[in-house]
Image: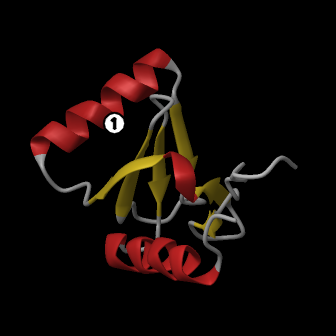
Amino acid sequence: MASGERIKLVKLINVGFGNIISANRIISIVSPESAPIKRLIQDARDRGTLIDATYGRKTRAVVMMDSGHVILSAVQPETVAHRVSDRETDGEEV
């Protein structure tokens, strides 16, 4: 590795039931209760970019990815956000 090069570490987080996503690619984590978020979920379903990681449980968090994918999780948004922030403090860029 040349002097001054930085390696970006891939940070993975668990969004419930052993489902893992890349924390580096998350744009937002929101609650599914509002009408605009429900429309966003339906639009993603129609486009084929919805990933349902709830295993049939109630959707508690909606994770928007930079790829346009929308991930449904049965874990509270605060819990997902906490897992992301834990990963950021565990391993910084080298």
Q: Is residue 60 above or below residue 51?
A: below
- Amino acid at circle 1: Ile
> Residue reaching furthest top?
47
Residue 38 x, y percent position in the rendering: 23, 40
Image point (27%, 33%), residue name: 40
Residue at the limit of the structure toward the front, as seen here: 3
Q: Nearer the viewer, residue 47 or 29?
A: 29
Residue 83 pos. (x, y %): 51, 77
The quarter of the picture where residue 20 lies is bottom right
- 1 to 85, vertically: above or below: above
Q: Residue at x 45, y 35 (%)?
A: 66
Count of number-bearing discs: 1
Looking at the rendered image, the quarter that the C terminus falls into is bottom right
Say above or below: 91 vs 43. below
Look at the picture and state if 9 lies above or below 64.
below
Specify whether 18 is left or right of 45: right
Q: Residue at x 88, y 49 (%)?
A: 1
Relative to 91, is 24 on the left or the right? left
Q: Secondary structure at mark 1?
A: helix
Residue holding disc 1: 41
